Image (spheres, rainbow, N blue to C red):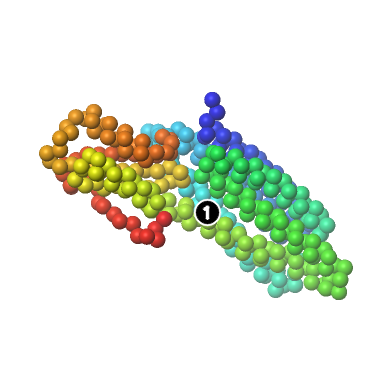
Amino acid sequence: MVTEKMIEQRMLLRSAALMAFVAVSGTIMGIVSNSDAILLDGICSFLDVIIKGMMILTSHLVAQETSQRFQFGYWQFEPLVLFLEGSFILLIVIYSLVSGIMEVLSGGRAVEMGSAIGYAIGITILECIYWVYAKRVNKRLKSNLVQYDTISWTVDIQLEAGIFLSFVIGYCLKFTSWHSYAVYVDPIVLIILSLQLVPSTVQILLPATRQILGMAPQGTHRRVQEIMDRFMETYHFADYVSSVQAYGHAKIIEIDILLPKDYPIQSVRDFDRIRDEINEEIGGQPLEKWVTITFTTTRRWMARDYTLDDDDE
């Protein structure tokens, strides 16, 4: 039987193989054409291959649920991998931006436009085909890793399309009275692409950082509270406290329920039935959540009650 985790791992493996091809061809073409912009794409692609390999390993680990060393599972590895990816890209962006500015100030760089244009259009078409395929598969799969993987492909497609468009303009400049400005095309493209990478880098870094820091997702927090408010009315609990933490699609949910000292239900089996009802109401895949529900008549055994701000996410 093919599980969702197996499909996720296959998608990441295919993505890594294609990105490895892009990395090798981009690095070679960057050297041959003397283009720093293409070389930047090649280096970014090599980093992406490493990150995709880490994503595949993370997907395998998460599927194992727990181990003796990681007794609460491997969910924390998912945002950690995404944080590393965003950090690496950010470092490359800063380096490339500085390099592009320095080259513009030093008089530009001559590039073999013809080969660069052919490479850019071929790789752009190839990456667009895979991007459409990955988006279609993930509509059903709903994998957090595949979702962020498609973001990296979106970035790469933008890079390739930008290189193609700019080098076409540079090639056309050679046949005009503006031919002396053609040497500035590559460093300007490098600067533009570096700036273009910033939003996508932030899109990866911010949620990953929030999850590594253990910041509670407000949407899930509110949903759990709405569910528990209904159970409060049904079972006449005295109070409850819920705590939520997210790692990718995985959620850690803890609910402490305060019972009146004369609460009529005393059987452990009855409390287990209530736990099952709450867990079923929360929903989600068993491998993507860790739900702990406790019952007590003493408030000191309950966690601290937090109210999230409206702008938290």
Circle 1: element type: helix
Residue type at the position of mark 1? Ile
Quadrant of the frame with the N terminus: top right
Q: What percent of the width, then of the height, locates residue 245? A: 37, 47
Quadrant of the frame with the C terminus: bottom left
**Residue ranking furthest to the left:** 262
Q: Residue at x 40, y 51 (%)?
A: 219
User: Up-down: is 312 above or below 70?
Assistant: below
Q: Is residue 236 visible?
A: yes
- Badge count: 1
Q: What percent of the width, then of the height, locates residue 4? A: 52, 34
Relative to 292, 208 lies left or right: right
Along the line of sight, which residue is nearer the eye, 264 or 153? 264
Q: Quadrant of residue 8?
A: top right
**Residue ranking furthest to the top:** 1
Relative to 179, 285 lies left or right: left
Q: Is residue 53 visible?
A: no
Q: What percent of the width, then of the height, locates residue 51? A: 57, 46
Q: Residue at x 65, y 53 (%)?
A: 156
Relative to 98, 206 lies left or right: left
Which residue has dot 1 on it?
204
Q: What percent of the width, then of the height, locates residue 149? A: 58, 46
Relative to 220, 203 lies left or right: right
Q: Residue at x 60, y 59 (%)?
A: 197
